[in-house]
Amino acid sequence: MPERVEPASAPVVLSMGGSVLVTGEGDERYLPELATLLRRLSPNFPLVVTAGGGRVARDYIRLGRAMGLTETELDELGIDVSRLNARLLASVIGPPCPAHPAGSLAEAVRDAHRSRIIVLGGTEPGHTTDGVAGLLAERLRAQRLVNATRVPGLFERDPRKDPSARRIDRLDYAGFRRMVDAAVSGTAGQQFVFDRLGLEALTRAHIPLRIVEGRDLPNLERALRGEAFIGTEIR
Ligand code: UTP
């Protein structure tokens, strides 16, 4: 059994969107650079990373929906793809990260108490990997949760559809909750910058959420370290 490592400080949770991790563009350079950053930061604070399913998960869910699969079966397709991405990232990080991602919150809590870095995908139907990240942040009393996405923060409107949309640099939980409620109905594969269940967990535990563009690694590092960064802070 691996030796239990007492964290020197509270963990930092990182929710890596699948559409940041595996984009089909430059992934073979990005993934090792991300892995190096996470290994380098892990002596400072334990890292708990969730991996999303990204475009591949959405493609499977779209196909499954056309085939008449139930919402639970569609969620399970998304979970499987996120676990595949978690497995890939865990392998690229290598030791001290366990190669086999935890399959449940309880397993993840156990792994987080034994390793300075863990990576996992989805756990159960009904939320996204941002939800997993929020629930784990609450259970582990994390310092903060950093959500790495394809856009540099939270915008008034989707900046990919409306380039004039402005970034919101700071927001409180209640203001963000109103935006999540307006955007998310909860069906499988639905996309918004964050998950309602995850936000509820962060609000209960008073854990700040930082939203950043995940491919900008120097900025991601500042956000993880708790330093000034470009993006959105919700608290
Ligand atoms: P993702 O976490 O990948 O959702 O889960 P996302 O918001 O699209 O994230 P990106 O694009 O990767 O950043 C994909 C789908 O998998 C199911 C849900 O249907 C979700 O929409 N899922 C995922 C679950 O049901 N439970 C989980 O724990 C995780």
Image (spheres, grey):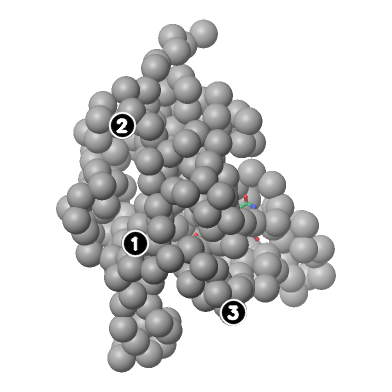
Instruction: Give the residue pinned by disc 3.
Output: 182
Along the horizontal axis of the image, is 112 left or right of 92?
A: right
Position of 229 compared to 5: left or right?
Answer: left
Mark 1 nearby-residue class (10 Å; few <14, some 14–19, many ≥20)? many
Determine which quarter of the picture holds residue 149: bottom left
Q: Is the Cβ of the residue at disc 1 closer than 8 Å to that at disc 2?
A: no
**Viewer-closest of 67 and 139:** 139
Q: How far apart, in angstroms, are the residues tagged by discs 2 and 3?
A: 35 Å
Q: Answer whether residue 151 is visible to the viewer in this image.
A: no
The residue tagged 2 is: 45
Image side of residue 55 versus residue 5, left or right:
right
Residue placed under numbered mark 1 in the picture: 233
- The residue depicted at 57 percent of the width and 45 percent of the height is 135
> Looking at the image, is 64 positioned above or below residue 167?
above
Q: CA distance from mark 1 to mark 2?
A: 20 Å
Q: Quadrant of residue 213?
A: bottom left
Q: Is residue 170 above or below residue 145?
A: below
Label 1 and label 3: CA atoms lie apart by 19 Å
